[in-house]
Image (cartoon, rainbow, N blue to C red):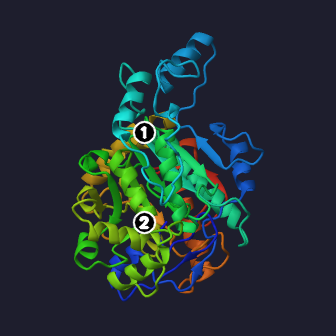
């Protein structure tokens, strides 16, 4: 996560000053936050247990009584016969996998470590060839695509294990997690939720780097690993990542080229959500990134370097976001050319700009669907498994409405399309106290509004929606909704 965001693995995180970056771009970068941010993205073990009771798709990756890693399968295997089970496993994990698999892979090399070891000589090399060799052994006929026929994506999110200090924080983080589970189920994405501190010295927002790196090794079949902060909400359940857009890049971050490369502003991007390709370039990049963090013996020196180099940075702490801006701007040829700064849609939208518009956005979408023809087919009730087809049809209809639903798919600072991701930077739902520039009520109402807005898109497949934007109560939908109200 970024420096001014809530801290996921809960020790402490510094929040920085915005340095006078004006307008919406500054808000979408990082907010000026003084002092240390503590445990803002904390997710209690009890909340994880509650999710596991509710979600039959969960599988445990640790035999410990309290799990630190929870994986949610997007396409659970459920078969009746042994032969059917074997076929399903072959399709899912490869025909030559398992304990008795022939051929050595990188997993059999004791020199390959899952851990981020700052200062260690070497590290993983030849990852692209090693990964390709593993794929050839396990998938000799080629890797099956996801249900959507796209490159495989693993989403990683997380928080620390201890309970939230803030009242209701555990419940809010449970709802944030439920939102990610819903999105991943609908889009064939596997979700890994981690609340273990994989590198003891890489605290708070730095803790995501070891988690993402370990996910790359644990999922060599995934082309992309997608980090999403715990306090980010998917507010457009229809939108899919435009992976084709990033075919020549290895890292995707929400930000602006001018602010990063021209002005070298520490708020020129936001590190709370990023997409990174599973390749050697990415492993090398994360090693370079980690060397600027608290596990490095040069951590204090890097704080001074960032303070002296980046515009608007008022403190001398090396945070993940400032370090990312520095790496891209200082080594543009090496790192910047393979990084895509996404500003074409809300890869992550600043919540203050989003939540007050959600009711109007919902009303416009309903109005578009009430037009009959041509929108009557969008109102048909259908199985949730058909979501992708209906999502494509709704997006096409939204684009065709013109003035009724202007703006880019995935939302943006102008227009009325649903925002893809709404990020509650500074609200600190688990720490108990939001950043001083927000009130508790504005954060609480904003989070509830965004979560209900997203949940209504999911509940519709089950015949319900929330009674009103801030209500926990739901009501049944009439046939031919929203034409019938």
Q: Position of residue 87 (x, y in %)?
A: 52, 16
What element does badge 1 sit on? loop
Q: Is residue 481 visible?
A: no
Which sits in the foreground, 2 or 419? Answer: 2
Label 2 residue SS: strand
- Furthest toward the front, the residue is 121
Residue drawn at 69 percent across, 61 percent down: 171
Residue 422 in view of the camera: yes
What distance separates the C-alpha of mark 2 from that of mark 1?
21 Å
Q: Which residue is mark 2?
A: 271
The answer to which image quadrant residue 473 occupies is bottom right
Q: Could you classify mark 2 by the number of other residues whose Cα lies within 10 Å: few (under 14), some (14-19), or many (20 or more)? A: many
Residue located at (62% from left, 80% from top):
440
Label 1 near label 2: C-beta < 8 Å?
no
Residue 461 spot, x, y in % from top left: 53, 42
Give the answer, above or below, for where 355 lies relative to 121: below
| Residue 342 image point, x, y percent | 30, 61
Q: Nearer the viewer, residue 322 or 77?
A: 322
Q: How many marks?
A: 2
* Residue positioned 49% across, 17% down in the render: 102
N-terminal-most mark, 2 or 1? 1
Q: Position of residue 75 (x, y in %)?
A: 53, 33
Which residue has dot 1 on it?
222
Residue 473 left/right relative to 447: right
Residue 355 vertical placement versus 141 (above, below): below
Other-residue count near label 1 (Cα within 10 Å), few / some / many at <14 / 14–19 / ≥20: many
Q: Is residue 221 left or right of residue 467?
A: left
Residue at position x 56%, y 22% in the image: 98
The numbered mark at residue 294 is none
């Amino acid at each position: 996560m970024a420096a001014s965001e809530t801290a996921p693995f809960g020790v402490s995180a510094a929040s920085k000053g915005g340095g006078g970056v004006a307008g919406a771009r500054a808000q979408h970068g990082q907010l000026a936050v003084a002092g240390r941010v503590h445990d803002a993205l904390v997710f209690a073990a009890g909340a994880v247990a509650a999710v596991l009771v509710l979600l039959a798709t969960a599988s445990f990756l640790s035999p410990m009584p309290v799990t630190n890693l929870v994986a949610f399968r997007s396409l659970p295997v459920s078969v009746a016969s042994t032969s059917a089970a074997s076929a399903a496993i072959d399709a899912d994990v490869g025909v030559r996998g398992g304990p008795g698999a022939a051929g050595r892979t990188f997993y059999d090399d004791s020199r390959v470590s899952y851990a981020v070891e700052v200062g260690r000589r070497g590290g993983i090399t030849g990852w692209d060839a090693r990964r390709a060799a593993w794929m050839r052994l396990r998938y000799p006929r080629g890797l099956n695509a996801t249900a959507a026929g796209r490159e495989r994506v693993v989403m990683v999110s997380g928080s620390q294990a201890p309970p939230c200090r803030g009242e209701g924080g555990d419940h809010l983080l449970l709802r944030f997690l439920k939102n990610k589970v819903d999105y991943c189920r609908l889009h064939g994405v596997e979700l890994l939720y981690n609340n273990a501190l994989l590198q003891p010295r890489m605290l708070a927002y730095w803790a995501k780097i070891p988690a993402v790196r370990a996910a790359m090794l644990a999922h060599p079949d995934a082309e992309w690993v997608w980090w999403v902060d715990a306090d980010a909400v998917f507010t457009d359940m229809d939108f899919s990542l435009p992976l084709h857009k990033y075919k020549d890049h290895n890292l995707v971050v929400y930000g602006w080229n001018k602010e990063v490369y021209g002005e070298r502003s520490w708020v020129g991007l936001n590190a709370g959500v990023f997409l990174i390709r599973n390749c050697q370039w990415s492993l090398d990049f994360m090693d370079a990134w980690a060397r600027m963090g608290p596990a490095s013996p040069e951590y204090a020196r890097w704080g001074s370097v960032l303070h002296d180099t980046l515009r608007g940075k008022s403190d001398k702490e090396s945070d993940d976001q400032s370090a990312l801006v520095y790496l891209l701007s200082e080594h543009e040829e090496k790192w910047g050319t393979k990084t895509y700064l996404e500003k074409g849609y809300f890869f992550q939208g600043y919540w203050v700009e989003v939540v007050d518009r959600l009711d109007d956005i919902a009303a416009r979408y309903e109005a578009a669907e009430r037009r009959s023809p041509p929108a009557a087919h969008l109102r048909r009730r259908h199985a949730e498994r058909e979501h992708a087809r209906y999502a494509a049809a709704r997006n096409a209809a939204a684009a065709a409405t013109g003035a009724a639903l202007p703006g880019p798919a995935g939302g943006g600072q102008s227009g009325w399309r649903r925002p893809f991701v709404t990020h509650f930077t500074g609200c600190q739902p688990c720490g108990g106290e939001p950043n001083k520039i927000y009130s508790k009520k504005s954060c609480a109402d904003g989070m509830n509004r965004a979560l209900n807005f997203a949940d209504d898109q999911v509940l519709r497949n089950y015949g319900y929606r929330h009674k009103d934007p801030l209500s926990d109560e739901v009501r049944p939908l009439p046939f031919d909704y929203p034409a019938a109200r």
